Image (tube, grey):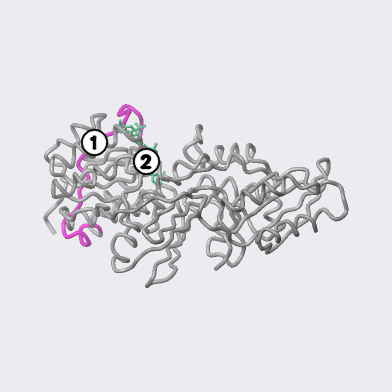
Amino acid sequence: MTNATGIGLIGLGTVGSAVARRLLDDWELLGGRAGSIPVLRRVAVADPTRGRDVALPRVHLDGDADALVDDETVAVVVEVMGGVDRASALIERALRAGKPVVTANKAALAAHGLELSRLAVECGVSLRYEAAVGAGLPVVALLRDSLRGDRVTALEMIINSTTNVILTRMGRDGVDFAAALRDAQERGFAEADPSADVDGHDAAAKLVLLSRLAFDAPVALDDVTRVGIRGVVAEDVAAATQLGGAIKLVAAAQGEAGVLTLSVGPALVRPGHPLFGVDDADNAVLITSDLAGPIRLSGAGAGGESTASAVLSDIVATVRDPAAPPPVPGASVTTGDSADVERGGYLRLRLQPIPEATELVLQALEDRGIPVRASASLDEGGTGAHLALLTGSVSRAMRERAAETLDSLAAVAEVVAVMDWLEPA
Ligand SMILES: NC(=O)c1ccc[n+]([C@@H]2O[C@H](COP(=O)([O-])OP(=O)(O)OC[C@H]3O[C@@H](n4cnc5c(N)ncnc54)[C@H](OP(=O)(O)O)[C@@H]3O)[C@@H](O)[C@H]2O)c1
């Protein structure tokens, strides 16, 4: 094979280095699959004076990403630098120059992906972003290509590795959030400023990207009701363990009758649910559709090599078909109120020291038509007896009202925690 396609790589960090290595070492394999050899011509980084642990023979490296985009030897632009505004501007510049783009950047796409996709269509070039969600898990391709004849009704996923590492450690070792976060930072799983992960922004961005594909819906970050994991305390993690489950940060989309509801928040998951047992840095995505039924994808959700796998598959697809237009969501959907979504509930209550307190709580829930599926008594030492409950599915609003009623019961000192429980189907 003699024909070649020039690749320009913006970013040579965790992901970019793994992409560069495979492009340089396995060009024959990639060329065979792409029909033209993807040749790394140029790399842009923030600091070109820094030493690199990947050798780049015959590759021009500097700090000028605009010049990389404009370089006539670069036919495909690969953006793996991260950030929102600068990265989006570079993607836009490439598309306007008629160059297809591959990106791993969920933050830029959640903010500007709709305009960028429209622009790619206008300019007649492709915009691919498999690596932006779930690293190497082929979830974008599944929704974009494989389920085109289906109607997706729900997405449920554990899609942020940092929070999963933190929550798994809290569950296994009984440490609190602060200690688990410090440990994740020391092991390279959390940034020095962890807010994008622990406050749920990263999961929300991924949920938005997948929901646009799954529901053809032009949703934005503002459409997501978002709660992070800073408020998850060791007592709830221990209660979840006692109930046989674990607390996870779950991103969920539910689309019914033209109403789409998006939420990110901590939820208790027990055996029997397809998201149970997804621990540490793993991710899992559960897609429910009317014809294919539930499909579950799981695997490593982060890391240079796993993410590079997705970037490289996009590079191969782009070299093969640089003009394939990205999907542009056009359906008219109404975004619903997440309080109306029906979910199982987890409640933890601190009881007054009276003998029949548990029975009074269970009776109060039954009176409100809220079924109780499981309960566990917990002795919290100094703070007295606690009761953890799992309720059947009712709307979150109804659950909140029930929690208020419980709070006012003489048998209850305080409703300490309320969150979703993913009741197995
Ligand atoms: N890491 C993962 O597991 C993972 C998984 C899925 C998706 N992603 C996404 O992949 C992207 C890259 O992530 P990463 O972990 O590889 O990041 P990273 O390790 O921080 O690397 C970022 C790279 O971009 C370069 N850069 C920053 N600003 C630049 C600019 N203005 N012009 C040119 N280059 C610039 C940096 O240059 P210097 O080297 O000189 O600092 C660095 O090489 C992000 O969008 C991220 O969300 C990452």
Q: Position of residue 334 (x, y in %)?
A: 36, 51
Q: Any mark on residue 50, and which?
A: none
User: Does the numbered disc 2 mark a residue whose Cβ is under 8 Å from ligand 1?
Assistant: yes
Considering only vertical position in the picture, is 36 above or below 194? below
Q: Residues within 10 Å of mark 2 (few under 14, many from 20)?
A: many
* Magenta stretch in the rendered image: 30-53
Q: Nearer the viewer, residue 312 or 221?
A: 221
Task: State ligand 1's quadrant.
Answer: top left
Q: Secondary structure at mark 2?
A: helix
Residue drawn 27% across the image and 48% down it: 24
Q: Position of residue 336 (x, y in %)?
A: 43, 51
Q: Is residue 401 left or right of residue 134?
A: right
Q: Nearer the viewer, residue 272 or 406?
A: 406
User: Does the numbered disc 1 mark a residue whose Cβ is under 8 Å from ligand 1?
Assistant: yes
Q: Any mark on residue 90, and which?
A: 1
Considering only vertical position in the picture, is 336 above or below 424? above
Q: Which residue is mark 2?
A: 107
Residue 31 drawn in magenta: yes
Considering only vertical position in the picture, is 49 above or below 2? above
Q: Nearer the viewer, residue 43 or 115?
A: 115
Q: Position of residue 423 (x, y in %)?
A: 58, 63
